[in-house]
Image (spheres, helix red, strand yellow):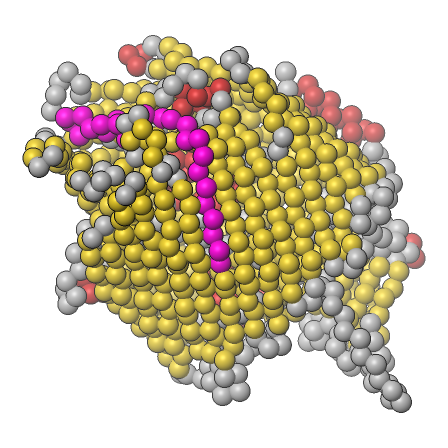
């Protein structure tokens, strides 16, 4: 049924639009009246509405290249410190050939005045140039190391880049999209030798999106050196060492005006990975939400835990983005393989601190995953765009668990037989999405989208507990989903400070859970539902010079065979953006139907049985999120700091709650809706460059305090579970351009959990000290790590040493890399790794990993271009 609208829409729109909007390459040179080139000048193109359409930075010869749209009212501005700004309005005379060649002459801004009145411009600049020459970096320092030394940026381990409280999810190269929701790859792939400088673009506009001033996106732009344009750059490396460990890597990157592409491959058995679940979800889920089982499989493919006895991974990514004056084509594909094994122990404790169950587990997983997304944006006219999205994912897993169980009954314990379980889940996920948008005038924009989503999961489980009556294939469940959706939007621009819109979405979904045991397929549960959503919104930019806002309210209607209801979601954001500081507030209320898996009984995590209920998939849950914050940043003084408060409240979230343990070691959990849970977090962050004239050091610190209540069922009784405590992070790293640098960091989580009148400690600290030496082509980093955990009265110590040594020449690098080197010698007597406490499901679980990856690898790397 969906093919007809797709084809009619595509053919009809193409035939109705025979004239094409165009973009022409502008090849320019910026110079003085005497003909001297001006390097480092910023060239920006603006639409008639004042939105940035493109930007570039002049090279040492004063030259630059960018695409110029053939649209009325387009302006080109050139700025450089010490020179008067140049602004030109584009007209038809510019477009007499396939490419535009222009020279821009700038005059020095040196005027003698009798009286000078300085008025400070408090507005936030559209772009900020950041130079990186004086940070104590080597030519092979990656983007992660570069940003970590800049006080205006905050980095998380999962690839999140924060700038003035804003997430950066796009990294452009010379103004063109290259890394989109691929931060971690960019952080590891872009090196200092490629970078002239960095730009933060605060008012970025996608060339293939029709919008007004309400769209305000912050991106990080890498201004690449001229030597790295239109050539293939990259490296290959291979290493092998003790404990039969190996690591092979290769990457190739290509940056140019029409095409940007990269290919990255890594095969290793040391647990290395350059992907994050957050980025994969953003790339491949689109507006459709993955089911709980989809999330479980994807997180399993990408999960990272150093405490493994075996961790083979092979990750391949190919990304191609081509942009011309008429179209943009993008393709992203990942092929992932891993084969890993973990060895751990768990201790389940009741709410009053008594032991319930202890286990010794050895788990293996063998994943294969192909993740792919492609998009095609086509400019039918200057005011008409057609776009298409295709997402295809396939995941396979072979999992196995061996568990030795001790069950406690009061003062007595009984050692049970070992339990083995296996699973071979596989999933497929396909999304087709097509849209058309049209700008009627400078005041009206409309769009319409059609989507079809198809997914399926097979989830078999077999058990071996030495009991013929229960052993064998105990589960062979199948999940299927088919969804159709249409969405239409109409937006009006009264002026830059008031842009209202209305949007309507209609979605129909059919889901089923089947049992495929013994060659028969019987339906266990099915759900057909419709979702209709009417949204009213408004946005504005630079109201009263500094105020930006966006807000929408919705009327949401869910209808299933058992339940029909109306809901009122909302979302808002408001910010005051000035040159040095930013205040912001944002909030949302969202409603979701419970996952279909809550309606059936399933074996999850190989050894846990989750008991669902028929009514749960027909009910909704709600999540409220609100935050308030302030950020200050002064690049010239090397100072940034911020304060924020966030609060998240959840209503009727379905959670598994511990019921009992079977004699074979299987645990039974009953799915129940938790009426109300909440979490509040107060945070203060700061960063400052110290001793900048002598021995520059970057200092940073973060302090947060979290408190909340996550109630849980104990049997049939709902009890409060209160958690509170601070989290502290302190770091120092020197930025000395000479041969020696150091890094010191300390992180501490000092939490407590209170259940009824019982309080449990959950405290951990990680302290690191590293020294770096560089000179004569050699670079060395020696790192000492000390981790101390106090978990429910138990103390766990871990100390270890990591070492990296490299000898570099023009093209070839020889190196050594060692992780957890003390495990080869046993000086510190480590017996526990990556210990942590999990409280959910009505029980406390202390997880102790007794093994960890260790390696000592010698490698060689060859760099081309």
Q: Is any part of residue 175 visible from this angle?
A: no
Residue 388 in the image: state x and y as whole percent: 65, 34
Residue 398 in the image: state x and y as whole percent: 30, 33
Q: Which residue lies furthest to the front in this view?
A: 757
Residue 401 in the image: state x and y as whole percent: 22, 35
Q: What stretch is highlighted in magenta?
A: 657-683
**Residue in the picture at 72% in, 34% down:** 536
**Residue in the picture at 27% in, 65% down:** 786
Q: Nearer the viewer, residue 317 or 706?
A: 706
Q: Is residue 509 left or right of residue 310?
A: right
Relative to 638, say whether 335 is above or below. above
Magenta span dominant secondary structure: strand
Q: In which quarter of the image is the N terminus?
A: top right
Q: Is any part of residue 335 visible from this angle?
A: yes
> Hey, which quadrant is residue 65 in on the image?
bottom right
Q: Does the magenta stretch include residue 662?
A: yes
**Residue in the picture at 58% in, 57% down:** 629
């Amino acid at each position: 049924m969906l093919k007809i609208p797709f084809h009619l829409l595509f053919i009809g729109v193409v035939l109705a639009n025979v004239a094409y909007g165009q973009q022409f390459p502008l090849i320019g040179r910026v110079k003085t009246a005497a003909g001297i080139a001006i390097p480092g000048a910023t060239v920006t193109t603006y639409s008639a509405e004042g939105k940035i359409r493109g930007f570039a930075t002049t090279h040492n010869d004063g030259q630059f290249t960018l695409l110029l749209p053939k649209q009325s009212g387009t302006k080109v501005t050139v700025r450089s410190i010490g020179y008067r700004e140049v602004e030109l309005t584009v007209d038809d005379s510019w477009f007499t050939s396939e490419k535009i060649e222009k020279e821009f002459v700038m005059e020095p801004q040196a005027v003698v005045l009798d009286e000078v009145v300085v008025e400070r411009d408090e507005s936030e600049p559209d772009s900020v140039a950041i130079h990186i020459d004086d940070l104590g970096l080597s030519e092979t320092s990656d983007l992660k190391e570069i940003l970590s030394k800049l006080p205006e940026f905050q980095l998380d381990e999962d690839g999140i880049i924060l700038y003035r409280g804003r997430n950066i999810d796009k990294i452009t190269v010379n103004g063109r999209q290259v890394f989109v929701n691929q931060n971690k790859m960019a952080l590891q792939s872009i090196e200092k030798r490629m970078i002239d400088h960095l730009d933060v673009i605060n008012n970025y506009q996608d060339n293939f999106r029709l919008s007004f001033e309400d769209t305000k996106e912050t991106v990080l732009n890498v201004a690449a050196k001229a030597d790295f344009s239109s050539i293939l750059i990259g490296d290959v490396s291979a290493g092998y060492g003790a404990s039969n460990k190996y690591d092979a890597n290769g990457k190739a990157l290509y940056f140019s005006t029409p095409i940007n592409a990269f290919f990255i491959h890594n095969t290793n058995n040391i647990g290395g990975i350059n992907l994050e679940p957050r980025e994969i979800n953003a790339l491949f889920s689109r507006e459709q939400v993955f089911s709980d089982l989809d999330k479980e499989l994807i997180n399993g493919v990408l999960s990272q835990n150093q405490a493994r006895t075996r961790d083979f991974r092979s990750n391949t990514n190919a990304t191609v983005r081509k942009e011309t004056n008429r179209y943009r084509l993008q393709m992203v594909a990942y092929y992932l393989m891993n084969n890993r094994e973990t060895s751990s122990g768990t201790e389940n404790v009741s709410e009053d601190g008594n032991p319930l169950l202890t286990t010794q587990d050895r788990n293996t997983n063998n994943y294969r995953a192909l993740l792919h997304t492609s998009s095609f944006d086509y400019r039918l006219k200057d005011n008409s765009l057609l776009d298409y999205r295709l997402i295809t994912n396939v995941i396979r897993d072979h999992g196995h668990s061996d568990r030795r169980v001790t069950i406690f009954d009061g003062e007595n314990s009984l050692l049970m037989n070992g339990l083995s379980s296996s699973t071979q889940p596989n999933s497929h996920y396909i999304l087709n999405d097509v849209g058309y948008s049209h700008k009627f005038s400078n005041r009206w924009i409309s769009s319409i989208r059609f989507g079809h989503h198809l997914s399926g999961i097979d989830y078999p489980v077999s058990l071996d507990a030495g009991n013929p009556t229960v052993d064998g294939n105990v589960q062979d469940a199948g999940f299927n989903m088919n969804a159709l959706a249409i969405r239409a939007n109409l937006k009006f621009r009264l002026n830059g400070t008031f842009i209202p819109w209305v949007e309507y979405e209609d979605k129909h979904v059919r889901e089923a859970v089947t049992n495929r045991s013994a060659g028969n397929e019987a339906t266990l549960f099915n759900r057909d539902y419709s979702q209709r959503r009417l949204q009213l919104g408004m946005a504005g930019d630079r109201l009263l010079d500094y105020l930006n806002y966006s807000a929408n309210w919705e009327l949401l209607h869910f209808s299933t065979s058992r339940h029909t209801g109306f809901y009122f979601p909302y979302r808002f954001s408001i910010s005051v953006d000035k040159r040095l500081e930013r205040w912001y507030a944002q909030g949302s209320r969202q409603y979701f139907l419970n996952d279909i898996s809550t309606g059936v009984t399933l074996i999850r995590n190989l050894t846990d049985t989750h008991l669902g209920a028929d009514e749960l998939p027909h009910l909704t849950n709600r999540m409220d999120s609100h935050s308030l914050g302030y950020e200050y940043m002064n690049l010239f003084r090397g100072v940034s700091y911020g304060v924020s408060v966030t609060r998240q409240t959840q209503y009727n979230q379905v959670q598994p709650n511990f019921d009992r343990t079977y004699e074979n070691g299987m645990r039974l959990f009953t799915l129940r809706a938790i009426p109300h849970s909440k979490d509040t977090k107060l945070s203060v962050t700061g960063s400052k460059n110290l001793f900048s004239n002598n021995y520059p050091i970057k200092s940073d610190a973060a302090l947060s305090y979290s408190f909340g209540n996550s109630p849980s069922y104990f049997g049939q009784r709902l009890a409060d579970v209160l958690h509170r405590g601070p989290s502290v992070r302190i770091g120092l790293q020197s930025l000395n351009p000479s041969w020696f640098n150091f890094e010191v960091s300390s992180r501490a989580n000092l939490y407590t959990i209170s259940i009824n009148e019982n309080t449990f400690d959950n405290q951990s600290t990680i302290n690191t000290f590293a020294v770096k030496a560089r000179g004569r082509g050699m670079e060395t980093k020696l790192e000492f790590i000390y981790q101390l955990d106090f978990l429910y009265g138990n103390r766990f110590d871990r100390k270890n040493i990591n070492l990296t040594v490299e000898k570099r020449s023009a093209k070839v690098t020889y190196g050594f890399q060692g992780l957890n080197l003390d495990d080869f010698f046993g000086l510190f007597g480590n017996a526990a790794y990556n210990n942590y406490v999990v409280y959910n499901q009505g029980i406390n679980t202390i997880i102790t990993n007794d093994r960890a990856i260790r390696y000592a690898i010698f490698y060689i790397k060859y760099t081309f271009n």
